[in-house]
Image (cartoon, helix red, strand yellow):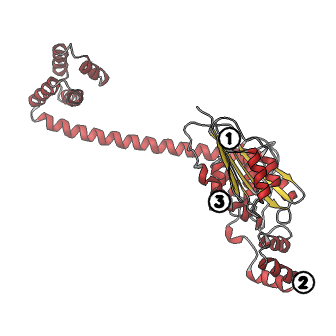
Amino acid sequence: MSEYQYYEFVAIDRPLTVAEQGELRAVSTRGRISASSFVNDYQWGDLKADPREWMKRYFDAHLYLANWGSRRIALRLPRKVLDPALVATYCVGHSASSMVTNEHVILDLSSGDDYDGDEEWWDEQSALASIVPARDELAAGDTRLLYLAWLLCVQNQELDEDEPAPPVPPGLANLSGPLRSLADFLRLDQDLLDTAAKASASLTARGPSKAAIAAWVKQLPAADKDEAIVRLLRGEGVHLRAELLRRYGNGAAIETATDGRTVGELLAGAETRWSARQRQAEEQAAAERARREAAAAAAREQRVDELAADPERAWQRVAELIATKKPKEYDAAVVLLVDLRALGERDGQRKKFRGRLHDLRQEHARKPSFLDRLERAGLS
């Protein structure tokens, strides 16, 4: 397997300056660089820079993908819209960690080197675009992304089994498109997610009501309202809604519920769900096999009934098919012989059939391809 690595970085909150683009170009002469992104892939070699440093200095989102199985997503948000302490509650392992700078909080989520050759390969050109909107959801107070990050640590057995689960946000059973893409990209186990979602409230319970917001806005100081409008009109309101929601809810625009379960209980619940699905799949497969076998038996019985009207004509047809010396006709001859055997067994003529089959094998002893087909059909 040849090596393939894909790196993509995106600047969202502000464009890269010409000088910053020059700094990136000094690292990579092949990279596709613009005021909003850096993209490069490597079949030999690697990026000559630390992605974590680039996230600190330049970018708001990063995706990494390698054909041996490694996957990584990093998202950066201003500290004024995302509380570092809240992030630290959920990003507690190697699979989900966080970094804090003077101005930003950076989430770093990864799925390890567990490549399965049969798994679906992501379209690297669209993967990050499908996930990035989850960043805005998090900025607006939707903590489901953080809970998915914590579940990733649980899945990879990075936490003690007796450790309690953090608060569960509503809507885990109904992820948004970007969050679904994130969960799929990081290979988050669906059984584990479904188990966790049992303690998650419906999305109908999320967010403050219009009346509550209106009442809160009325009591805001006039200077704060003026500042918000000025920032919006000057194009400085990228995260203005998130900031106001955080101020309104004191950092919790979406209410969460205490889970009460431990890591071990979540893992056990996921295992139970997996076992139940496996049993159901096995039962369905067995029922489907029985259906096919019954249909095949009914079709064979109908063919045998037709052969019973003139079995000698069937034997003559077998001889004609063998005489062609063509593999496809050999197959058809064997099918007829199988049906003739069933007819002999049904009518008490089994010994007679075996005698004629023996003569047939002797007659065509120099046709190994045909004889091999007889063996495989149990006509020995």
User: Would you say 33 lies left or right of 83 here?
Assistant: left
Number of on-image labels: 3
Per the model, the C-alpha gap separating discs 3 and 1 is 20 Å
Question: Does residue 286 appear in this view?
Answer: yes
Per the model, the C-alpha gap separating discs 2 and 3 is 36 Å
For this rendering, which residue is in front, 331 or 128? 128
* SS at mark 2 in the image: helix
User: Would you say 325 lies left or right of 286 here?
Assistant: left
Q: Which residue is drawn at 21% across and 31% down?
A: 332
Label 1 amino acid? Ser
* SS at mark 1 in the image: loop
Q: Name the residue under label 2.
A: 223
User: Would you say 74 lies left or right of 247 here?
Assistant: left
Per the model, the C-alpha gap separating discs 1 and 2 is 49 Å
Q: Residues within 10 Å of mark 3 (few under 14, many from 20)?
A: many
Q: How crowded is mark 1: few (under 14 residues within 10 Å), some or many (20 or more)?
A: some
For this rendering, which residue is in front, 175 or 351? 175
Of the image marks 1 and 2, the number of the one nearer the N terminus: 1
Q: Percent position (x, y) of residue 228?
A: 83, 79
Q: Percent position (x, y) of residue 124?
A: 61, 49
Of the image marks 2 and 3, the number of the one nearer the N terminus: 3
Q: Mark 1 points at which residue?
A: 70
Q: Name the residue under label 3.
A: 178
Q: Which residue is drawn at 68% across and 66% down?
A: 202
Label 2 amino acid? Ala
Q: Which residue is drawn at 13% across and 34% down?
A: 308
Classify the position of the C terminus by image quarter: top left
> Which is more foreground, mark 2 or mark 3?
2
Residues at badges 3 and 1 in contact (C-beta under 8 Å)?
no
Q: Residues within 10 Å of mark 2 (few under 14, many from 20)?
A: few
Residues at badges 2 and 3 in contact (C-beta under 8 Å)?
no
User: Would you say 127 lies left or right of 334 here?
Assistant: right
